[in-house]
Each structure stands twice: as structure tokens, then as C-alpha cells.
Amino acid sequence: MKYIEFDESRPLDLVLLGRVAIDFNPAYNDQVKEEFKPLKKVHMFEMFLGGSPANITVGVTRHGLKAGFIGKVSDDQFGEYVVDYFNNIGVDTSHITKCKNGEKLGLTFTEMLSPSESSILMYRNCIADLQLHVDDIDEEYIKSAKAILISGTALAQSPSREAAMKAVLLAKRNNTRIIFDIDYRAYNWENDDTISIYYSAVAKEADIIMGSREEFNLTEKLIKPGMTDEESAALWQSYHAKIVVIKHGMKGSTAYTCDGQKFSIKPFPVEARKGFGGGDGYGSGFLYGLYSGWEIIDCLEFGSAEASMMVKSNNCSDSLPGPDEVRAFIKEEKEKYGEMIARV
């Protein structure tokens, strides 16, 4: 069953709104291999595009979708790097604008201590991405897209939160599908009540909601705390959601559909390089499947496979695969572990 109908006449498949950053990860390539160690002992880093919505932009583009990005970047070499990166892979950058008051892109330094233990050190003072303004939101651009993805981080502070809310309202007015990637990051939020206020406002309008159990708990704090996954799905489907995806890390994830069905998947077994980055691959693969008209369980399997591929990688953007690579990975994993390795 096809749960989401997209307007196929629109030139852009997906417009993503929110955070873009610069990642510095311990170097791990043919020339230099910084093995697992504390961040303070790392000497060489590799630079990558970062930020969840930016990474998903890269991921869906690698799958052949036409994506655009709405965001703010710094007026410096890092801002140029981001725009050049997107342009080089075919992302529409017409609605990425530069900050005018010296705000900088976020810098993320990754600590990799073991395959299961990693963390990030973020510099987000005077941050560029949260300077997105209501004046940066163009109704015609939103009308040109089949769907818009709102990253929850964009709701953390003004003026970005008002810009994101304007985009949601314009999308609703113009029948542009709304995808809400809750994407909680502790930085820049004032308190949990504020999180619930703004997350729930977007979730009530969304056609698709994706997040971890913890992220749904934050969203629902002021509505009904302590809900089960089934209760959460029913709540948001009582508004507008057609698909609610709730993730439980290594335990897997479940998609709840508006006809009362649920579909579950487990991660594919891999030797991890880091404990994050999988969610961006998951989102890219899952959305590619939806746009392709696949069954929900196949979308989940593709997303889960891409997530596993990304936790093996040393970055969250450059290594995002194309569809043939994901299919080859699934085939190899099933030959090794059995046809139902990720199916629940």
C-alpha cells in the first residue's frame, strides 16, 4: 500500500531545512590511521560535511533524488566548502544564504574510543545555522518540492524556529508533504518544556515522523508522558501522520502506518567504527524507498542496511552509498547470515 502520495509534477523531490556543520574526525585512510584513542591524543583529523539534514541531503542525492537545501552558512571558507560540496553533487543551493554578522558554522570533533564508545565535542557559539530567518523562507520554493524535511534542531532557537514554523505552514498551505526528523541535540535548547512545545507543534502537521524513543518522549512531555510506541503512533496519526518511525538503536526500529499496521527491522551486523551517523543513512535509505513506491518493510530494510554501512565508515557524508552499493551490501549480509538476518 502507498501511504504517501507525492505531486510528481514538482521539480524537486525533497527540500531539507536545518543544520549544516563541519565534522573533524580522527584520520583513518590509506595514509594515516588514528586508531581508537582519546580525542586529546589524536594528531590528524579529516574534514567532512556534517549535520544530520545536510547528510540526508547528500544521501538522497546519491540515490538519484533531486534535493534542495534551506539554510544559513558562515561567510568564510567553511561556508564556501559547504556550498561547493552541495553544488558538486547536484544539490540545489539557491536557498542557502550567508550570515552577515560573523556567525560561524558549527565545528564537530569526534572522539572514537572503541567500536561501541564514541562521542562528539561541538563548538556552537554564535552559530550560523540558527540564524535562518522568516525572510529566508520562500513560498514558491516550497511549492516546487514534493516534500520538505524539517530537522528538529532548527527549532532550538529564534530566529530559526520561526523560520522552520513558517516553512511548515507554507508547506501545509501548498500541499507539500512534511517530514519531521526529530533530530534532538541537547545544545542550544533552553529546557525540556520548550522542546515539547515546538516539537509537538511540527509533529501535529507532519505526514511522516522519524525519531528515537527518547526523542518521542521529549516531544510528548507536555501532552502525555510515558506513552508506549503504539500509543505514540496512534496519537500522531490522530493528527496528520501517515507513517511514524520509532527507533530503538541496536534493538531495531518499527514503522507504524495509518491503517493500523506495523513493520519492524533490526540492524545488519557490522564491525562499527563509530556509534553515530547511522541515522542519516537510515533516513536516506528509508525515504528513497518511499519515493520509489516500495513496501514499508523494504524501505526499512534498505534504511537499516544503509545505517549499518555508515557506522562502519569514518564519516557521515562522504561514504553515503548509492542504491547499487546498498543492494550489494544487503546481498552480502544475507549470504553470510541468512535471508531473514534483519527481519523481525
Image: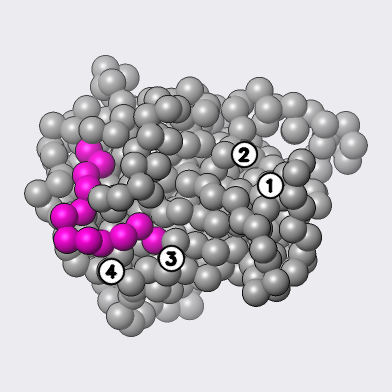
In whole angstroms, how far apart are the C-alphas of marks 2 and 4?
Answer: 29 Å
The amino acid type, in three-letter code, at marker 1 is Ser
- Residue 311: percent from the left, percent from the top? 68, 51
Numbered range of the magenta stretch: 95-106
Who comes first in sequence, dot 2 or dot 4?
A: 4
**Mark 1 or mark 3, which has the lower sequence index?**
3
Which residue lies under the disc numbered 4?
A: 126
Q: Which of marks 4 and 3 is nearer the N terminus?
A: 4
Amino acid type indicated by mark 4: Cys
CB within 8 Å, label 3 to label 2: no
Q: Can residue 134 be seen in this view?
A: yes
Could you say where residue 56 lies in the image, as x and y percent from the top left? 47, 42
Looking at numbered disc 3 in the image, what kind of residue is underneath it? Tyr
Q: Name the residue under label 2.
A: 319
- Give above or below for 44 relative to 95: below
Look at the image and say whether residue 104 sits in the magenta stretch: yes
Q: Are marks 4 and 3 in contact (CB under 8 Å)?
A: no
Classify 128 as above or below 323: below
Q: In this view, does 2 lie above or below 177?
A: above
The alpha-carbon separation of the residues under discs 2 and 1 comes to 7 Å
- Tell me which label, 4 or 1, sits earlier in the chain: 4
Residue 313 circle label = 1
Give the class, few, some or many, for how many residues have Cα within 10 Å of label 3's Cα (few <14, many ≥20).
Answer: many
Q: Mark 2–mark 1 contact, CB under 8 Å?
A: yes
